[in-house]
Image (cartoon, rainbow, N blue to C red):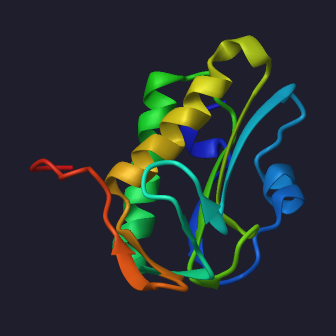
């Protein structure tokens, strides 16, 4: 099957993320493995500057974010041609602890085809190049959370 015929989903949404629905959309009859990464809102951060979070507010420039998500999916397909389905979905809005904020799903015929690495690559690249911003609100105030990545020309 050509990459253009393989299921690829990328979206920014305010709706609740539905893992079962997304998985069904990127699963083919030949699929035998799915690697899934789910990012969640933490209510308690223990690493680094330990603190409590009441909720996060996610924002995005949706047209650019979805174009960058497509770029991530294209990069995955180039690095792992055996990947069958890809879903990259980021939720925006006000999200409370224990709520999924992002889902990355990669499917393939077998688990030993790089499907785990592809999903890991998907979340790492999303964090690097997709314009999504989050503000953390806690008992001590609010703060925009900055990432470490600085885009290079052409990215």
Residue sticking out furthest to the left: 153
Instruction: Give how far across and how far down residue 90 sits, in percent.
Output: 58, 66
Instruction: Give how far across and how far down residue 144 sits, in percent.
Output: 35, 77
Above or below, 152 relative to 20: above
Above or below, 82 relative to 16: above
Res. 91 image quadrant: bottom right
Instruction: Give how far across and how far down residue 155 sits, in percent.
Output: 21, 49
Q: Is residue 123 left or right of residue 84?
A: left
Q: Nearer the viewer, residue 104 or 30?
A: 104
Residue sticking out furthest to the top: 112
Q: In this view, does 151 lie to the left or right of 84?
A: left
Q: Can residue 30 be seen in this view?
A: yes
Q: Can residue 41 be seen in this view?
A: no
Q: Residue at x 90, y 34 (%)?
A: 29
**How many numbered marks, from 0 up?**
0
Q: Which residue is drawn at 44% across and 28% down?
A: 78
The quadrant of the picture occupied by the N terminus is top right
Res. 15 image quadrant: bottom right
Instruction: Give how far across and how far down residue 31 sits, in percent.
Output: 84, 30
Q: Nearer the viewer, residue 13 or 140?
A: 140
Above or below, 65 relative to 7: below
Res. 102 image quadrant: bottom right
Q: Which residue is drawn at 76% across and 67% down?
A: 98
Q: Residue at x 89, y 57 (%)?
A: 20
Q: Which of 130 and 82 is in front in this view?
A: 130
Q: Is residue 129 left or right of residue 9?
A: left
């Amino acid at each position: 099957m050509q990459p253009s015929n393989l299921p690829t989903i990328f979206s920014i949404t305010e709706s609740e993320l539905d893992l079962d629905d997304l998985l069904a959309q990127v699963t083919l009859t030949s699929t035998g493995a799915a690697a899934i990464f789910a990012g969640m809102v933490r209510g308690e951060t223990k690493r680094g500057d330990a603190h409590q979070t009441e909720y996060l507010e996610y924002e995005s420039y949706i047209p650019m974010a979805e174009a960058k998500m497509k770029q991530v999916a294209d990069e995955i397909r180039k690095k792992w041609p055996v990947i069958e389905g890809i879903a990259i979905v980021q939720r925006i809005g006000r999200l409370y602890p224990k709520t999924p904020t992002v889902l990355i799903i990669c499917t393939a015929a077998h688990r030993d085809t790089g499907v785990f690495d592809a999903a890991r690559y998907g979340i790492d690249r999303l964090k690097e190049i997709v314009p999504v911003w989050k503000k953390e609100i806690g008992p001590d105030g609010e703060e925009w959370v900055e990432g470490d990545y600085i885009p290079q020309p052409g990215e």
